[in-house]
Each structure stands twice: as C-alpha cells, then as structure tokens.
Image (cartoon, rainbow, N blue to C red):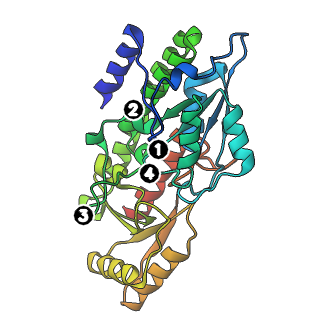
Amino acid sequence: MFFKSKLILGILIAGLFLLPGCTQAPKQNAADNAAPAPEDGSVLNVVATTTMLADLTKVIGGEEVSVHGLMGPGIDPHLYQASAGDVNLMQSADVVVYNGLHLEGKMGEIFESLNTQGRHVICIEDGLQKTELLHPEDNPKVHDPHIWFDVKLWQDVAGMLAQSLTEIDGAHAADYRSNLEHYLTQLNELDAYIQQRAAEVPEGQRVLVTAHDAFNYFGKAYGFEVRGLQGISTDSEAGTSDVSSLAEFITARQIKAIFVESSVPPKTIEALQAAVKAKGFDVTIGGELYSDSLGGKNSGAETYILTCKANIDTIVDALK
C-alpha cells in the first residue's frame, strides 16, 4: 500500500477530482452548491467525527484548519447519537469529515442531509478500494469499519484527506501536500515499529482476544489471529453461548492474556475471564487497548501514532 500512497501524491500534483458522498444522497451538483472555502485568509473550520479523524485532520491541515472533534476519547462511535448541538456544529462548519462504513451507525441521516444541502462533506469510505476492506465471514455485504488499525491503509486515508482538502482549499494545496509527505514518513516508521514488536511474539502465541471485533485489519497486517467477543459493532450484545465458545477456545489454546478496550465496558471481558477460570484455566487481562478512539489527555496515547504504539506494546508485553 505504500506505493499507492506515493501514487496519491502524484495525483495531487497532476490534478484533482471530486469524490462522491458516502451516503445515498442525491448526487446532482451538490458540490457545485457547496459553500466556498474562506477567502479572507481565515482557516477552514472542520468538524471530524472520531478522535482518529480529528487527529489526522489536524496533521494534514496544519495551520490552515481549526478542527473540532465530535467524539471525545473513550466514546464508542458505533453507539454515538448526535445532539442538537452536534448537528449545529456540523451545519456551520466549512468541512465535515467522517469515517463511513457504518462506523457512525446512528448518524447516517445527518450526513445524508448535509450532502443534500451541498455542504463540504468528506467521507473516508469513498477513498478506499472495496478490495482492501474486510467483512464478517457470515455477511460479505457489510464491511469492517476499523480501517485505522492497518497503518498502510491509514496512509491511503491520509492521502485521500489531503486531496479532498486541496479540492476545497486549493490556495493551500502546497501546505497540505507537504504535511502529507512528512506524515507518510512518520507512518512508515510506525509500521516498521509495529512489525518489529510483533515479531517478539512467537507465531503460535499471536492470538488477540478483545471485547469486540475491532482488530481484524491489525491481525491481517501484522500476523495475529483475532477473536472478538462481540461483532464488528458494539451495537450487538455478546450472548452466553458467545462467552462459552470463546472460553473453550482460550482454554484449548492456552492463551496467556485477553484485553479490555477503552471504549467498551470491561464487564464482558471480565465475564469471559470467569468462564475460562470455570473451565480450569487462568487467563489474565493483559491490559486496555484503544479500539474505537484514541487515548485521552495525559494517557500517552493522545495521537494516532502514540495510540498504535501503546496498543502494540500492551499486546506484545502481555503475550510474549
């Protein structure tokens, strides 16, 4: 995927094209009716839904954007319901950035309305090839939205965001390209760090058990078998049979540690730990992983890069 990120840079330099909206809003000239970018030298006012996208927009936008993150650290985007204040923020913003792939599952009508109004809306889903996306084995029509856990895929997202900001605010195209180039280098270093740390865990022990199925992109990219107690959305509850089945798996494989998530209540993983103990095996809770949001203030995981490093360090230290 690295070469594709470089290709994105070439596209930025050679020419730009408009991306369609993620929702099924009417396509007729919505972008033509969109409010123009500020021409008075002021920065773009951007609202980004998740902490991951807010961080990315700050990095790519730099001094040319002012970013408001809709969801704070520890917030579950699958269950997030926008308030009237949130809607007002998005309607008054110059640009709205959201993930798509049903991550913000309860906000679809809002994004559709913004598209219909001709607002500048950047849907990350639109910049990704469907062949790159994962889906549950039992439902090939639903794509896994947790794309940020593959650093190479996140490079593509960064390129798409830089391109979209340039389309909206061409006066600062050089700034967005420069910020992107610098960030891609940092992401290459991050990817190498994760691979290096993952190699410390013997292949047979690379099994990641978490509260919900958020880490499949991570598992595919870095060689981990991933098991989530809930599905790809926390909107579904884990049943007794789910707990029992996963407890059997952990006991049979003698897995050393399982993990709670910062945006999911720990009770399901604690119930899983108790079920494993009832089967005569002790499994530890190896720590807390950041799944659907970055870490909060003073967590040491306030940015995407720091969050990815914190996650791999927690996983490797518990499993090796």
The residue that disc 3 covers is: 204
Q: Is residue 275 above or below residue 39?
A: below
Q: Which one is nearer the viewer's eye here, 220 or 45?
A: 45
Q: Is residue 196 above or below residue 274?
A: above
What's the residue at 46%, 21% (across, down)? 163
What's the residue at 52%, 26% (across, down)? 30
SS label for mark 2? helix
Say which of marks 4 and 2 sits in front.
2
Q: Percent from the top left, x then y, of residue 250?
A: 33, 76
Give me the disc on residue 127: 2
Give me the disc on residue 155: none
Residues at marks 2 and 3 touching, judged by CB atoms closer than 8 Å: no
Say which of marks 1 and 3 sits in front.
1
SS label for mark 4? helix
Say which of marks 2 and 3 sits in front.
2
Quadrant of the frame with the C terminus: bottom left
The residue that disc 1 covers is: 100
Q: Of label 4 and label 3, which has the lower sequence position?
A: 3
Q: Of label 1 and label 3, which has the lower sequence position?
A: 1
Task: Report the Cα–Cα distance between label 1 and label 3.
Answer: 34 Å
Task: Report the Cα–Cα distance between label 4 and label 2.
Answer: 27 Å
Residues at marks 1 and 2 touching, judged by CB atoms closer than 8 Å: no
Q: Given the image, on which type of amino acid does mark 3 rest?
A: Gly
Q: Of label 1 and label 4, which has the lower sequence position?
A: 1
